[in-house]
């Protein structure tokens, strides 16, 4: 089975998977919403590295290699600066580190908006070079013909509407969307258009609760929310946000751990052990054999 995860354990720190596992498929994810109902909410998290993918994989239906990699891993101020090469490098790592979840890779800003052909060239390169199952693209009605073009050519697409961070320069910030009637109507029109074009799922980001509810009941595909209330068919968070790696996070984030403090604590203990020469100790030292 090509999705079975194997590693050379003589040279790798990563753990091999104990038994072959069949990877979830795009149609299986789409089928989780049936007759407008999603009995089991879809679980999605972002991942950017092989080891994190291994840890998250048993718990997630989908792993998203988000262009948030730019901010989380590279310290960029916006996702606008993320390149296709970055997405492909991290996408490949997440596919290698996972064996069950559907892996979706974000198309970065400037690599798909110009034309349907540009989007196809970019998306096909992503699938070919990473092994991921699908791509995600930000945008509404104007992007619908592109989504249709890709889907018709065998490229599964996840849409992304509401707050679209790649458009931060046009939006002027990351505030919640859909507070006015006109804005809400525009976003629901975007969601309908992208779903009708064949997206198998939609990420809806940073919208007020009534709009999230309306979108979720308006489209047949699963709606995965981030900052979009519990009304959606599933949820996604940026992994480092939910692990408590950053001091500042958006209001919609719940910290399920406080990893930043735990890492600081470990580094403090390591530094003290190096300075007082208690590390490395006998157990951590190679000796001549015989
Ligand atoms: O880039 C990303 O991590 C995303 C999520 C916020 C959905 O698109």
Image (cartoon, grey):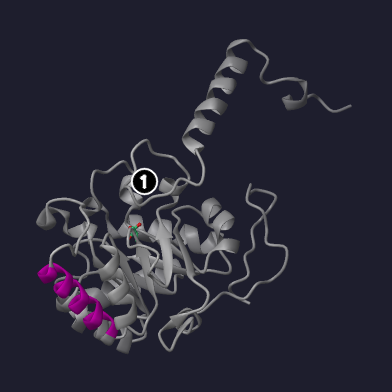
**Number of residues whose C-alpha sits closer than 10 Å to that of mark 1, classed few (under 14), some (14–19) or many (20 or more):** some
Camera sees residue 137:
no
Specify the quadrant of the image occupied by residue 1.
Answer: bottom right
Q: Is residue 257 left or right of residue 154?
A: right
- On the image, the x and y values in percent for residue 79 come to 25, 53
Specify the quadrant of the image occupied by residue 54.
Answer: bottom right
Q: Quadrant of the C terminus?
A: top right
The picture quadrant for ligand 1 comes to bottom left
Q: Is residue 223 above or below residue 153?
A: above
**Residue drawn 27% across the image and 87% down it:** 196
Asked if the beta carbon under badge 1 is closer than 8 A to the nearest atom of ligand 1, the reply is yes
106 or 59: nearer the viewer:
59
Magenta stretch bounds: 181-195
Residue 185: within the magenta? yes
**Residue drawn 49% across the image and 71% down it:** 41
- On the image, the x and y values in percent for residue 128 come to 40, 73
Q: Is residue 272 above or below residue 234?
A: above
146 or 8: nearer the viewer:
146
Q: Is residue 130 left or right of residue 212?
A: right
205 or 53: nearer the viewer:
205
Q: Secondary structure at mark 1?
A: helix
Q: Which residue is mark 1?
A: 72
- On the image, the x and y values in percent for residue 62 come to 48, 68
**Residue drawn 68% across the image and 58% down it:** 16
């Amino acid at each position: 089975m090509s999705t079975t995860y194997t590693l050379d354990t003589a040279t790798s720190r990563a753990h091999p998977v104990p038994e072959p596992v069949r990877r979830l498929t795009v149609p299986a994810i789409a089928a989780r919403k049936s007759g407008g109902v999603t009995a089991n909410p879809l679980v999605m998290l972002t991942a950017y590295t092989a080891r994190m993918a291994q840890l998250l994989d048993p718990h997630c239906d989908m792993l998203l290699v988000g262009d948030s990699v730019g901010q989380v891993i590279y310290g960029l101020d916006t996702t606008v600066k993320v390149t296709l090469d970055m997405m492909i490098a991290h996408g490949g790592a997440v596919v290698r580190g996972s064996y069950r979840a559907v892996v979706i890779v974000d198309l970065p800003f400037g690599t798909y908006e110009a034309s349907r052909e540009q989007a196809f060239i970019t998306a096909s390169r992503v699938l070919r070079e990473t092994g991921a199952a699908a791509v995600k693209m930000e945008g509404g009605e104007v992007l619908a013909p592109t989504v249709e073009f890709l889907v018709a050519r065998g490229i599964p697409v996840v849409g992304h509407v509401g707050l679209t961070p790649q458009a931060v320069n046009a939006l002027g910030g990351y505030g919640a969307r859909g507070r006015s009637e006109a804005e809400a109507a525009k976003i629901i029109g975007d969601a309908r258009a992208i779903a009708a074009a064949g997206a198998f799922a939609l990420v809806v980001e940073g919208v007020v609760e009534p709009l999230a509810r309306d979108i979720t009941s308006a489209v047949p595909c699963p709606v995965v929310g981030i900052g979009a209330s519990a009304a959606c068919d599933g949820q996604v968070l940026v992994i480092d946000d939910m692990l408590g790696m950053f001091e500042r996070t958006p209001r919609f984030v719940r910290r399920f751990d406080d990893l930043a403090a735990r890492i600081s604590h470990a580094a403090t203990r390591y530094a003290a052990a190096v300075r007082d020469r208690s590390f490395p100790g006998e157990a951590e030292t190679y000796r001549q054999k015989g």
